[in-house]
Amino acid sequence: GSTIGMVGGGQLGRMFAIAAMQMGYDVVVFCGSADEPAAQVATRTVVGDLLDHDVVSQFARQCQVITLEFENIPAETIRWCGEFAPTYPSHHVLATAQDRLVEKTTFRDAGLAVTPFAAVDSAAAVGEFAQQHGWPVIVKTARSGYDGKGQHRLAGLEDAAEVPWDSADAWIAEQCIDFDREASVVVARSSVGQVRCFPPFENDHRNHILDVSVCPSNLSATQREMATTIATRAAEVLQLVGVLCVEFFVVDADTILINEVAPRPHNSGHLTIEGCHTSQFEQHVRAVCGLPLGSPELRVGGAAMANLLGDLWGDQGEHPDWDHAVAVPTVSLHLYGKSDAKVGRKMGHLTATGDSVQAAKAAVMQARESLSE
Ligand code: ATP
Ligand code: MG
Ligand code: MG
């Protein structure tokens, strides 16, 4: 069969590889260590330095098409891959999505509403930003943040001293949005230009980390339409091929703002594996291989996903007893094959489906709560 290259070894690469191999593709994973989640399931693995051109070419020459699972892969690596095979998303998309300032500027210039923001480099600059946009202000590293890492919520100017200004190349200040809810749309755009959106997911975060996602969301028909239209526009503005997740702050009946995007499958889309006709991972395979896209619609009344963080594991790394969780009807367990559980680390997730979103959410919450009893 034909071979897809996957740059990055995390859980998104793992679930992509499982979907691709089910469809008859070989998957070569390129990552830093043979025990990473995706390397454990791939057809083959190339282990090495992502910035070593020789290793990159050794990987890339095995592939008919190349994709990635994490936006913080060096854009240079992806540019080199492109010398050997079509590479989706492109290094241009990656360079945009790697930098919050570039990303927000790109969407704002395209007429899409984003959280008010500015580049800042000092307490004085944050003070100026707050004069215009009010307190609190959220200060983030412009690059390489994920799961809320590198974020500071400043209630007033006196808090600005807590930001380690010298530790990052660039910082961004964002207005703290008093949102009604958070939502996301995963949009797929194929190499032949077909576009399909999954129905919006509604997301709850804890400590800036995704906790629970459900579908269908509680958004109004108008808000769903807006979110889907914006996600489609975002994919077109980027000329993206693959899948893109657009994260939204839903502010009121007719205001929704882009928080950020990720040019890959997304944690909030994990419920599509059991919940939708086509999973986000299969859709990613179809998009980068130029196949017709599948139906993204729910195939049940409702679906819900709850993350399993390292917090649930014991001090010695003992995992919870899964029996009680999987005993709950319609609940599915996904573990990513990570051995070192740490607080806040994504180790796996649970999904439940049901006749309604309420039933699915109740089942997944019951399953997760059973793990800490
Ligand atoms: P990931 O890529 O894993 O989603 P990240 O580090 O890029 O994480 P963000 O999406 O920027 O993080 O922020 C994580 C969460 O923190 C958001 O989903 C939201 O709950 C909260 N948050 C971030 N920025 C803001 C903001 N400007 N106003 C209000 N809440 C915010
Ligand atoms: Mg992010
Ligand atoms: Mg985010």
Image: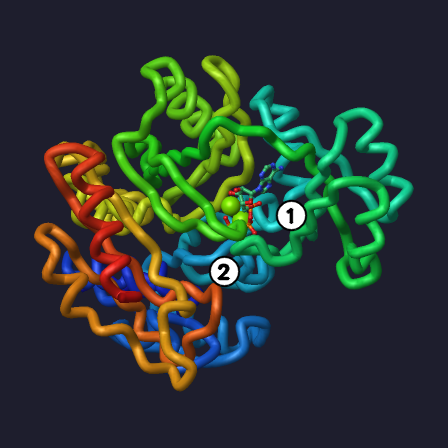
* Amino acid tagged 2: Glu
Residue pointed to by mark 1: 99
- Front residue of 186 and 256: 256
- Side (left or right) of 10 relative to 109: left
Label 2 crowd (10 A; few <14 / some 14-19 / many >=20): few
**Secondary structure of residue under mark 2:** loop
Residue 274 x %, y %: 17, 48
**162 up-or-down from 58: above or below:** above
For the point 42% across and 42% down, which residue is it?
A: 204
Q: How far is mark 2 from mark 1, CA to CA?
A: 24 Å
For the point 31% across and 30% down, which residue is it?
A: 217
Residue 289 seen in render: no
Q: Which mark is residue 359?
A: none
Residue pointed to by mark 2: 83
- Side (left or right) of 137 relative to 287: right
Q: Nearer the viewer, mark 2 or mark 1?
A: 1
